[in-house]
């Protein structure tokens, strides 16, 4: 059984509060960027997507406890890279495979 003390609990509570504050700030940043009067919509979309990516990484790392699962994350990433390279290779290999039109059968 793990040893728990009030100091460990306070440190964990402080860490959870900081993560919560980061998620709230990220969400507020996304909402503010969506309502901001930016003339170029591409910049506004880039700001919202950047804030969303940061928010998602904080949630995945701390709330989903993935920050301590390095071996599993690297394994999943390795499989992703292998399958992506395989699919791109198959797509490139089949890009010149154009079906030919067969003359209709007449009777």
Image (cartoon, rainbow, N blue to C red):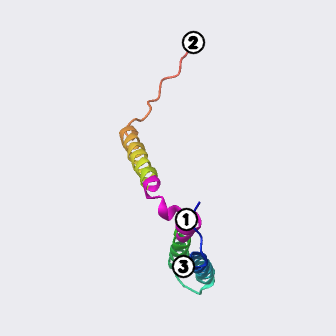
Dominant secondary-structure state across the stretch colored magenta:
helix
**Numbered tag placed on residue 60 in the rendering:** 1
50 to 39, vertically: above or below: above
Magenta highlight on residue 13: no
Residue 48, x across and y down, in percent: 56, 75
Residue at figure coordinates x 43%, y 47% from the top left: 79
Residue closest to the eye, 70 or 10? 10
Q: Comparing marks 2 and 1, which lies closer to the viewer?
A: 1
Give the alpha-carbon distance from disc 2 to disc 3, as whole Å: 63 Å
Q: Which residue is mark 2?
A: 107
Give the alpha-carbon distance from disc 1 to disc 3, as whole Å: 24 Å
Residue at figure coordinates x 39%, y 42% from the top left: 86
SS for callout 2: loop
Residue at figure coordinates x 40%, y 40% from the top left: 90
Which callout, 2 or 3, points at the residue further toward the start of the chain? Answer: 3
Q: Quadrant of residue 15?
A: bottom right
For label 2, the crowd category at 10 Å Cα-Cα, with few meaning under 14, some 14 to 19 and many 20 or more, is few
Contact (Cβ within 8 Å) of mark 1 with mark 3: no
């Amino acid at each position: 059984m793990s040893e728990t003390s009030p100091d460990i609990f306070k440190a964990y509570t402080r860490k959870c509060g900081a993560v919560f504050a980061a998620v709230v700030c990220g969400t507020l940043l996304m909402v503010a960027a969506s309502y901001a009067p930016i003339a170029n919509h591409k910049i506004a979309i880039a700001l919202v997507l950047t804030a969303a990516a940061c928010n998602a990484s904080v949630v995945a790392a701390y709330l989903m406890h993935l920050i301590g699962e390095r071996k599993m994350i690297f394994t999943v990433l390795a499989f992703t890279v292998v399958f992506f390279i395989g699919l791109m290779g198959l797509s490139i290999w089949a890009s010149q495979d154009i079906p030919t039109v067969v003359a209709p059968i007449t009777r």
